[in-house]
Amino acid sequence: MFHWDDVRYFLALHRAGTVSGAARRVSVSYTTITRRIHALEAFMGAPLFKKQGTHYSLTGMGQDLLPTFEDIERSFVRLEDRAARPRATLRGVIRISLSESILRLLAGSLASFRMRHSEIVWQLDMTNDFVDVSRGLADLHVFPRHGSKRIPDRYERISLGRYGVRAYAHRSYRARLRRPLRAQDVDWIAWDTSQITDELSRRPSSGLETGLRIVAAASSGTATLELARAGLGAALAWDFLAADDPELVALELAEFTRTEEICLYVLPEALRRPPIRAFADYVVQSLSATRPG
């Protein structure tokens, strides 16, 4: 069978004149060069090199093949160069509406996407509300999907995956609680969504049951987690925010351990814009590559 690498090894041996020199040129072993040259000669049905001491020179068949192999090399170089270049220049402002918590999930994707497309500028609207992108307030909105709330049909919904949510508290706070742990024994820091204007954004009691001891409330997930980190009590938090924090531990409360889907919401007409489509595809792929499991 004929391989492009055999052409590389043929040209490397022709240009270096020795097997060791050819091996250094293409960063393979001495035996790889000799083995692949023998395979190429078997494929062509004739010797391509003649050896004098340690020096190799082309036979008549080798000389005949040299222009063809050089053309093949130039073609592959052009293909590699074309593959390395961006297929299209993406430029302009991409406006994304999201919460501070979800920004922690997406920040790496924003940075790496712009490394590929240096003319993209991010404009971030930090909010806990569900943003109506049809009003032109943002190009993309990233928000948890809540099964009890109906998202308007005019939106395209793109799943960014399911992520763990559980109760977290400072290590010292957990050490003070009795075992086995009960939710009723915990001081809870709740999400307060009462001041959020959009009905879709409201999460009643933030998933906390009535009758629990709530000692603080805030409208920001990062704020509730900061209070938990200070030792005030326990807060429900995304694993991607809290799992790697050395000051925090997850509480063994199965009733507060779940997964939630995070989605990207966009209008179909916005997805026809190349920068928006490219980023939507990219963030799905990059998060899928980094998500456990």
Image (cartoon, grey):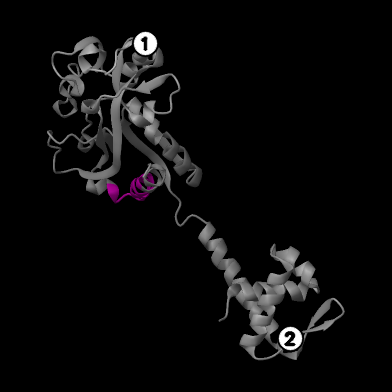
**Residue 83 relative to residue 25: left or right:** left
Q: Secondary structure at mark 1?
A: loop
Front residue (pair 196, 6) = 6
Front residue (pair 110, 231) = 231
Quarter of the image that includes the N terminus: bottom right
Q: Which is nearer the N-term, disc 1 or disc 2?
A: 2
Q: Residues within 10 Å of mark 1 (few under 14, many from 20)?
A: some
The image's mark for residue 251 is: none
Q: Amino acid at mark 2?
A: Gln
Q: Position of residue 283 (x, y in %)?
A: 37, 44
Q: Position of residue 288 (x, y in %)?
A: 37, 46
Could you tell me if residue 67 is visible in this image? no
Q: Residue furthest right?
A: 53
Q: Position of residue 23 (x, y in %)?
A: 73, 67
Q: Which residue is mark 1?
A: 231
**Compared to 115, does 16 lie above or below?**
below
Could you tell me if residue 31 is visible in this image? yes
**Compared to 65, does 89 lie above or below?**
above
Residue 277 inside the magenta-drawn segment? yes
Q: Secondary structure at mark 2?
A: helix
Nearer to us of marks 1 and 2 is 1
Q: What's the magenta region? A: 271-284
**Compared to 271, does 23 lie above or below?**
below
Determine the image quadrant of residue 248.
top left
Q: Which residue is mark 2?
A: 63
Q: Look at 63% across and 77% down and name the residue there.
A: 71
Quarter of the image that includes the C terminus: top left
